[in-house]
């Protein structure tokens, strides 16, 4: 796709071309939006935050969040499908934790920093 003809030129032609090139990759921005969508729900943020700090089973997550196991499982599924959390089976028990990925670490840091800024009483 050819760079857009801007109505105003501000002397930053090469940078504008690079930015325009990135903007044309709508699929990249869609991927980012999908990741943020996973954390667009308070319960999912709470679950993800918890699993960044410790590995837990559904029953313990349910108790900690005062929710039913099916409701917790409903929220775990998209987090797992997006690769933000992983699980392991031990006998009949399934344990969940945050994925040890750059994406997971970054999202955890973002949550922590936003909480520090917006919730100073913590």
Image: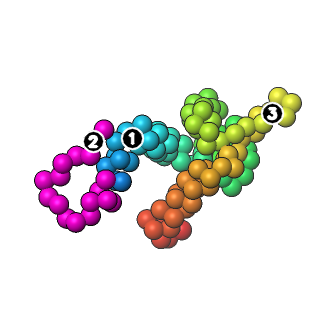
Disc 3 marks which residue? 89
Is 44 rendered above or below residue 110? Answer: above
Q: Residue at x 26, y 60 (%)?
A: 13
Label 1, residues with CA under 10 Å away: few <14, some 14-19, many ≥20: few
Q: Mark 3 near mark 2, Cβ–Cβ under 8 Å?
A: no
| Mark 2 secondary-structure assignment | loop
Left of 94 or right of it: where is 51? left
**How far is disc 2 from disc 1 in space, using C-alphas?**
13 Å
**How far is disc 3 from disc 2 in space, using C-alphas?**
51 Å
**How far is disc 3 from disc 1 in space, using C-alphas?**
39 Å
Relative image position of residue 38 (x, y in whole percent): 50, 40
- The question of residue 11 being in magenta is answered with yes
Left of 117 or right of it: where is 65? right
Say which quarter of the image contains residue 87: top right
| Mark 1 secondary-structure assignment | loop
Say which quarter of the image contains residue 77: top right
Is 71 rendered above or below residue 60? Answer: above
Left of 75 or right of it: where is 51? right
Q: Residue at x 37, y 39 (%)?
A: 26
Q: Identify which residue, 49 or 85, lies in the foreground.
A: 85
Is 119 rendered above or below residue 32? Answer: below
Q: Which label is found at residue 2?
A: 2
| Mark 3 secondary-structure assignment | strand
Q: Mark 2 near mark 1, Cβ–Cβ under 8 Å?
A: no
Magenta span: chief secondary structure: loop
Q: Compare marks 3 and 2 and give the one earlier in the sequence.
A: 2
Label 3, residues with CA under 10 Å away: few <14, some 14-19, many ≥20: few
Disc 1 marks which residue? 25
Q: Nearer the viewer, mark 3 or mark 2?
A: 2
Q: Compare marks 2 and 1 and give the one earlier in the sequence.
A: 2
Q: Quadrant of the N terminus?
A: top left
Q: Which region of the structure is painted magenta? A: 1-17
């Amino acid at each position: 796709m050819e760079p857009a003809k801007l109505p105003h030129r501000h002397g930053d032609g090469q940078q504008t071309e690079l930015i325009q090139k990135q903007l044309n990759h709508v699929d990249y921005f869609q991927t980012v939006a999908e990741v943020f969508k996973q954390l667009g729900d308070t319960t999912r943020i709470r679950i993800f935050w918890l699993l960044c700090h410790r590995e837990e089973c559904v029953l313990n997550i349910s108790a900690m969040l005062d929710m039913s196991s099916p409701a917790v499982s409903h929220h775990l599924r998209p987090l797992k499908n997006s690769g933000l959390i992983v699980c392991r089976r031990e006998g009949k028990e399934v344990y969940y934790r945050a994925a040890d990925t750059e994406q997971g670490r970054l999202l955890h840091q973002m949550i922590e920093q936003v909480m520090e800024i917006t919730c100073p009483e913590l």
